[in-house]
Amino acid sequence: MDKIINTNKLFPSLKPEVLDSCIHCGLCLPACPTYLSDLNENHSPRGRIHLIKAWFENRLEYSDKLADSLDTCLMCLGCETACPSGVHYEEIINNGKIALANYKSPSVRIFSRLVFKNILPNYFILKLNYYFLWIWQFIKGKEFIYWLLKFFQPINKYLPGVLDPIAKLSQLQMFLPPIANNLVFKFKPGLVKGKKTLNFFHGCVMELFYHEINQSTLNILTNNDLDYLIPHQTCCGALALHAGEIDIAKGLARRNIAYFGLNVNPIVVSGSGCAAMLKHYDQLFDASDGEIFNQAKDFSNRVVDITQIITQIEHCKFQFKRKTRIGYHAACHLAHAQKIHQEPIEFFEKLQAQNPDFIEFVAIQDAEFCCGSAGIYNLLHTDSSLAILERKMQFIREANLDLVVTSNPGCLLQLQAGLTLFKVDVKVVHICELLDTLINQSNN
């Protein structure tokens, strides 16, 4: 695949052979969360490809039905892993969403562009949002919303639907993240000495809600005598790209390429969604973009997901108070976008082999199946997201686990919400958080 992106016009622009590579065999259907949720062919990968192809060939005009088909795609890319024909679904759906962005209402477009261009890349504004969420949780805002709904319920018979927005808001509170204990938000650029130097990409959402996991990642690197540089950086641009705002995504990519271009060291990333986007920077540009095309290639080749490093770590002998059953949920942007399937499994198998009395690795059914988070999908399509999440929670419950481990902040938020919502007594942790905790226990 040469590029993810070819256009920002009012209809997709793709090579015919890319669209024709789908033979509509249907093997992608069991891997598609939205199709399994409602069995609607328009919400399946092959259905979306069929609609985009008709749109591309001017046999179909823009419609709400077309928009719904593309908007409801989580872009988990499970279909790419399942496809025997090697269809580049990511290229197809990205082009479709970029064209779709031009048909959104002005208010929606202005708001989304404001968020992607001016809020996510701005750590000061992110901190203000963080404090707002902290205050919201401190004053028990969710309980207040539930009380409000109950108190005003009688007016529904006089003003039908007036409480719908409030009801929706109360549902979204399930996805509020836990607030970090230390209220630290941004690492200062610097260098820690060791035997090998790595750049660390801490992300925006990851650093905002999960600073402690980023710190655990750095602790792991330091414990294994690895340097880490923390260059100036900005949002990776994944959310902007998935919303079809390609110019913002390319602008953020240019900035990160410039920031990390001051050295040639590998770039390690603790969040799998960010890592997937950074590894795809080379597909945002082509030769017509000038020197940035080659710079993006060099940048993407340097990106390393933390899961590709931890399998090489030797400090794996630990002791728990009792045997702990650990399951692994594979983040979509690790398994399907980055094609990293075995490294995390090898990590857990190694832990179990060296700690047979204390650790038991248990396979979760459909471990690589989406949890329904998908960036901000759970906020925009909450009902569909919850249906997908319920399926994931069912398999986690059946596995009878003590810990569920994953590698992406979106998955952490979603799974933590699911444990509360569906009353599953399991703890969810990031893979670096787990390893850092185990190392600390072994050193004490």
Image: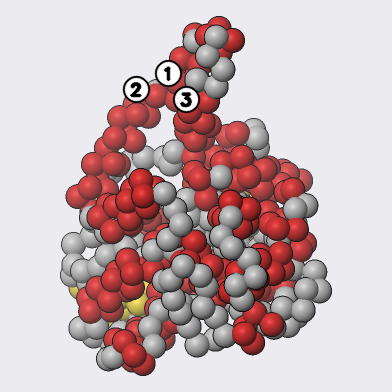
The disc placed on residue 139 is: 2
Q: Position of residue 253 (x, y in %)?
A: 32, 73
Residue type highlighted by circle 3: Ile
Q: Residues within 10 Å of mark 3 (few under 14, many from 20)?
A: some
- The residue that mark 3 highlights is 166
Q: Quadrant of the C terminus?
A: bottom left
How crowded pointer 1 is (Cα within 10 Å; few <14, some 14-19, many 20+) is rated as few
| 82 with respect to 97 (left or right) | right
Q: Nearer the viewer, residue 339 or 190?
A: 339
Q: Amino acid at mark 2?
A: Ile
| Residue drawn at point x = 59 percent, y = 10 percent | 157
Q: Nearer the viewer, residue 270 or 193?
A: 270
Q: Position of residue 161 (x, y in %)?
A: 55, 22
Cβ–Cβ under 8 Å for marks 3 and 1: no
Give yes or no for contact between labels 1 and 2 (Cβ–Cβ under 8 Å): yes
Picture coordinates of residue 403, whole percent (x, y): 60, 49
